[in-house]
Amino acid sequence: MTQTIAPRVRTLVLLLLAAACALLAGAGPASAHAAVTGSDPAQGAVVDKAPARITLTFSEQVALSDDSLRVLDPEGKRVDTAKPATVSGTTYAVPLHSGLPDGTYTVAYQVVSADSHPVAGAYTFSIGAPSKTSVSVSGQSTDDGVVGWLYGFGRYVSYAGFIVMAGGAAFVLACWRRGSGVRPVQRFVVSGWVALTASTLALLLLRGSFTGSGKVSDIFDLSLLGQVLQTKSGAALVSRLLLLAAAALFIAVLFGAYDKREDAEEKRDLTFGLSIGGVVVAAGLAASWAMSEHASVGLQAGIAMPVDVLHLLAVAAWLGGLGALLVALYRAPADTPVDAPAVRRFSQVAFGSVLALIATGTYQSWRQLGSWSAFTDTRYGQLLLAKIALVVVLVGVAWISRRWTGRLAETVPVQASAVREKERVGAGADGAGETAAVGDAEVSAESEGDTGLDTEEQPGTEPAGTEPADSERAAQLARQQAARDAARQKRMRDADPNRFGLRRSVLAEAGIAVVLLAVTTVLTQTEPGRTEQEAKAASAASASSSPDEGASGALTLNMPFDTGGEDGKGIVTIDVDPARVGGNEMHVYVERPNGRAFDIPEVKVEFTLKAKDIGPLPVVPDHIATGHWSANGVQIPMAGDWQVDVTVRTSDIDEVTVSKNAQIG
């Protein structure tokens, strides 16, 4: 039965890992954890004269580098003159060259938020009138490309490594101390230490490029590494490496001196020392995340950081212990099976961890969301709902495991020992009698076939009068007998239906835990719902107070024309923004009937309010680009039903005037 289970186990684990990787890969770029809440000039604004500087206001304090704020002219050349500086609080500025010509300028920013996540973006404003620009403001994600993907994967591996190492060691000390001498469990815990150490080193190297250029070639730039070491994130990663050195010593003692201790009192004292030291090291490692991420900034940071540490420790005790239990159930030697008391103790530890997770998770959710609407209106809230659903499913499967634990047979090891004793007593008869005594003739025959020995050559069946076997042959026969005993014991142990059911439920728990960890990793890289909603509210307030906004909104008029000459047909479009009393911005677009823009010799616009006998008010827009004219500061003196006349000249003699009425003001 167990021979057919192993391939299924490997396949299921691979599928679960693939699903987790797909979730990470499809998570998309991490949202910014600091948002732009204001700027001067504002996004899309058209100013009459060139500003002396550009200012940006963020929702929280950010870290700046020399190139954090860049201003580019329509040709893509930088027009900022110095390093960005802090104006006050969360407002930052960069000075500009004086006397900048008219046109559209691009402001690009790339900073690091207080919780260590990079924030990048861009927007445009215009001086005098909008113009063509060669600068693209799309694709301003902070973690596109290879470096961003590697950094995200490194974060996932670091979380997984901590959970495996800390949770596996806790499982051995608190639940199954015999496991300190089980090689598969040792490899499981050590692999967690290796994964956490390797991923921490990788994150330290990737950090500079990830928060900067995003280029693979900058990963091994020592100057960037030096800058990273001076940041909060760099200090957290270095602290983690130092604590991992202490963790290595802890693991060496746990699987070395501790396993070899035979005196009960000495082992009890060493257990106490390892427990205290292990908790201190694990809490320090968990704090390396809390001190540099969400918990370190925002509301009640002094409370949030220890709560975050407790949350990580509870996750490690539950999921890491679950992984160690899975390894023990499938890979532990037949003579050292994980027993029912160990599984029951882990069930109690897991129950306590779930209670801690509920308490700390509730506080974290309130702190990061702030309102019920953030659950559905923000990406952070949606991911949190997915995480909660996975935890509920995981708890349900754990309840099934708890039922199997209560029914787990404890008599299998005792029965196996009795069988071995009976076999040794009956060994003087013959090999067949030995096999019959345990009712397992098939296993005995297979073992004999494997060794190539005849029945007469088995222990206790040598013919009378033959010389005793030499010591080497006796040792070989003893090893063969031990192998047969172990195989028989393993078969009897695995035949227990309760143990088989527990294996399947624990495997399902582990699979869900892999996906849960992936969701959690993405969640830690996502802008908290409270911050996102505050940024939206600030942007909305800023937009509502902008003098460029009118009550009527923008006005668009489409008017077909035909001058009668060659290429005389087309459509002229007039955009007036914000179409209110006072100054307005006007754009004129000329297109062929197929929608393709084209130039004409002249275009003029006049506004007439016949009801008040005002006008015509002429406007001669400036040519900006192919088929595009613009005029700024178009004055509308009074609200009313205005007639808009557009004169289009397509040649020296071909000209036509088209008109439309529109409510302005």
Image (cartoon, helix red, strand yellow):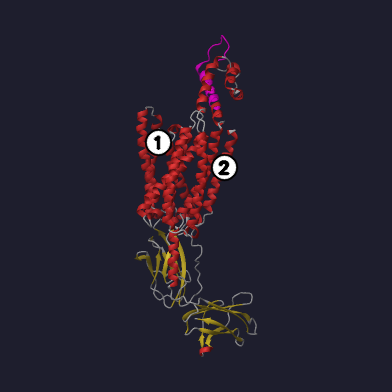
Q: Secondary structure at mark 2?
A: helix
The range drawn in magenta is 460-487
Amino acid at circle 2: Leu
- In the picture, measured across the screen, residue 17 lies left or right of residue 310, that is right
Of residues 239 and 598, the one nearer the viewer is 239
Closer to the camera, 144 or 531?
531
**Mark in the foreground, 2 or 1:** 2
In this figure, what is the number of numbered marks? 2
Place of residue 583 in the rendered image (x, y in percent of width and height, measured from the top left): 46, 81
> How far apart in space, not on screen, are marks 2 and 1 (Cα)?
32 Å
- Residue tagged 2: 12
Mark nearer the N terminus (2 vs 1): 2
Magenta region includes residue 631: no
What amino acid is at disc 1? Ala
In the rendered image, residue 477 lying in the magenta stretch gets the answer yes
Residue at 55% from the left image edge and 45% from the top image edge: 16
Q: Which mark is residue 252?
A: 1
Determine the secondary structure under disc 1: helix
Q: Main secondary structure of the magenta part?
A: helix
- Farthest residue toward the bottom? 613
Looking at the picture, tell me which residue is in the foreground, 575 or 398: 398
Across and down, in percent, residue 605 comes to 54, 84
Which image quarter: residue 262? Answer: top left
